[in-house]
Amino acid sequence: MNSKRAPKLFIGPWIGEFGVELLRWQSIARTLAQSREWAEIIVATHPDRFFLYEDFATRFVACKPGTIHTIGHKCHGHSPPHLHTRYINTAGGDVWLDPNAVPATGKNPEHLYYPISACIPTYRDFGSTLPKPRNSYDLLLHARATPKAGQKFKNWPAASFNALVEALPRHLRVASVGAVDGAHKIKGTDDLRGLPLKELAAHCRHARLMIGPSSGSIHFAMHCGQPVLTWISQEEKCNYLPVWNPFAVPLCCLTGWQPEPEVVLYKTMEMLRLLESRRHTIDLLVIGTKRSGHHGFIDWAARMQPERCFTLWNDCVKEGMMSFPDEAYALPTTTCLPKQLHKAAAEASLHEWNAGGRAAARCLSFEGISLPHLASLPEAREARKIVVVLRDLANTAASLKQGIPELQDKPFLHPDFQRLMERGREYLREAVGKTQWLAGLGSKVVFVSYNRWHTDAAYRRQTARSLGLRGPEPDRGVISDYVHVSSFQRSGTPADQLDTLNRWKTFTGNRMFWNLVCDPGTHALEQQFHGKAMPRYAEWP
């Protein structure tokens, strides 16, 4: 019988920035704690943070820094360097997990673990088992107000928070959270500052949204399953990549420490609408290339179902699935979210139709994603119907050149043009049966020729039947700020008068244009798919 005792595990001391401890060290400590049997698991940290470890620690040691000016995981000399020796014996086999350690040398380096390389993090949803507080809130505000570590520039002025709260709808219940000496209590809000972490976790779990500049409180809310609206510098935006959002909460992360109050108000209302519509079934998932006409198609399809109140999540992105043009403000995410959501501007990423409809539904729109990515989406399996809208490549390329600022000064054979055209070819090959990327989604996939849909009322009726749209066909509206946007014709032009199938004529004499769009094999497939609605290129060289 082996009589050797189980070792003890000493974690810490960790008394640096709360956000860093939350994102990195507590999760790695949890993995190590679960890796084997320990005689005792001792955690040394600030007493306000014991809650982070209570699911596995057997003993706590309180450590308080002598300054608020901590940054990262270190306390600049205020962290007791040999505290572990009072509780464990590394020479006897006990283990010390220390964020301040340098690489081990000597006889028994295995008795000292380093958080950066020790193990994969194991996160805990701190709010998942907590009951709803007696008083719950729609919005929690963290009005950071601290000069610590020379980072006063991160504070958003109390006046801006006051302006935000003043402009919010009166029915929303709002509370201020954070440390009493590190956050403002905003006028018109209830004061929840100074709550123990466990009580704050319960409020985070059951509130709709947390708002404030990037901080430990914002990260804590995400680790309680709460959606957040935050802002941070571009260089530090990596703190909101999917690895730091382990429970995939909806997130709006703006760039810059001082957004305008009206932008934060706009994004707050968009986030609340997004969270509400997130509960609704996905009726349509529509994809197309940029300038494919799929936005006009969405408008038509939504208005053919007047009994449904539709919310469109426009140009959604997901981790590893970014539509053109790539934007620094758009964060990858493990769930689908509208691309525009992270842009620090009052520009809509959600659009609504049929406000008086009895039932609610969602429509998701993707521009230029690959079909294998589409086939892998849980949202694709959930959607009632998937629509792929194709416009002929020549008219698509002409509209791209005219309407996309990032392309206007580039030649037609630039890699960006070629990438966009190749995605159109990918959709075309699938539409005519040359590939089977979407075969696993069965009969819910419908390919629509924009050319025929735009010109042929009978084809529109056929398309409506295949999608289960039974309402009377509406007029197709006019060019507006969203649907039917045209770079060739002015706003107010009736949509059915858009000259969308003759855009190619603008570039008749441009040989690079024809080399881009009209290889014989693709042209034959386009004629097969679009039929009589395929333009006749008399001037094709």
Image: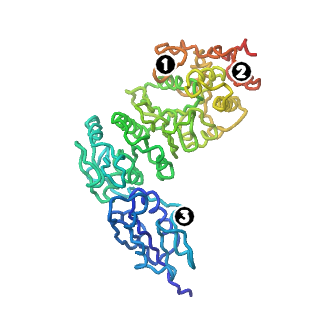
Question: For the residues carrying marks 2 and 1, which lies nearer the camera in this image?
Answer: 2
Q: Residue 202, image x and y in percent? A: 33, 55
Nearest to N terminus: mark 2 or mark 1: 1
Nearest to N terminus: mark 1 or mark 3: 3
Residue positioned 63% across, 23% down in the render: 397
* Residue 29 sits above or below residue 541 on the image: below
Which residue was labeled with disc 3? 119
Amino acid marked by disc 1: Pro
Which residue was labeled with disc 1? 472
Quarter of image, res 13: bottom left
Which residue was labeled with disc 2? 514
Task: Tell me the distance, in whole angstroms, between the alpha carbons under discs 2 and 3.
Answer: 54 Å
Of the pair 10 and 72, the residue shown nearer to us = 72
Mark 2 residue crowding within 10 angstroms, few (<14) / some (14–19) / many (20+): many
Quarter of image, res 40: bottom left
Amino acid marked by disc 2: Trp
Of the pair 392 and 441, the residue shown nearer to us = 392
Mark 3 residue crowding within 10 angstroms, few (<14) / some (14–19) / many (20+): some
Nearest to N terminus: mark 2 or mark 3: 3
The quadrant in which the N terminus is found is bottom right
